Amino acid sequence: MEHYIKVRRTVMVEGRSEREVARYFGIHRKTVKKMCQYSVPPGYQRKKEPIWGTVRIPS
């Protein structure tokens, strides 16, 4: 989360380009673009339940 805030601040407040920030932090420029689109990291959400269901232990 801290890294996310630093990247957004550098682009939006300090006015540096997304490409420059990407180079500085060592991340892809598309990642920087996505970080600037969302104020909070979107997180991972599974689209649908796994096909295999629950695991059964044979007795």
Image (cartoon, rainbow, N blue to C red):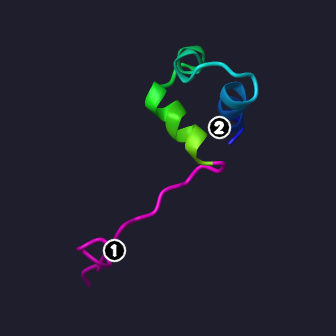
Q: Is residue 46 shown in magenta? A: yes
Labelled disc at residue 4: 2
x, y percent for residue 18: 55, 24
- Tell me if label 2 and label 1 are in contact, CB under 8 Å: no
Q: Crowding near pointer 2: few (<14 within 10 Å), some, many (20+)? A: some
In the depicted structure, whether residue 50 falls above or below residue 24: below
| Residue at x 48%, y 57% (from the top left corner) | 44
Type of amino acid under label 2: Tyr
Q: Quadrant of the N terminus?
A: top right
**Image quadrant where residue 50 sits:** bottom left
Secondary structure type for disc 2: helix
In the depicted structure, whether residue 35 falls above or below residue 46: above
Which residue does the numbered mark 1 point to in the structure image? 49
Magenta segment range? 39-59
In the depicted structure, whether residue 51 falls above or below residue 31: below
x, y percent for residue 53: 29, 78
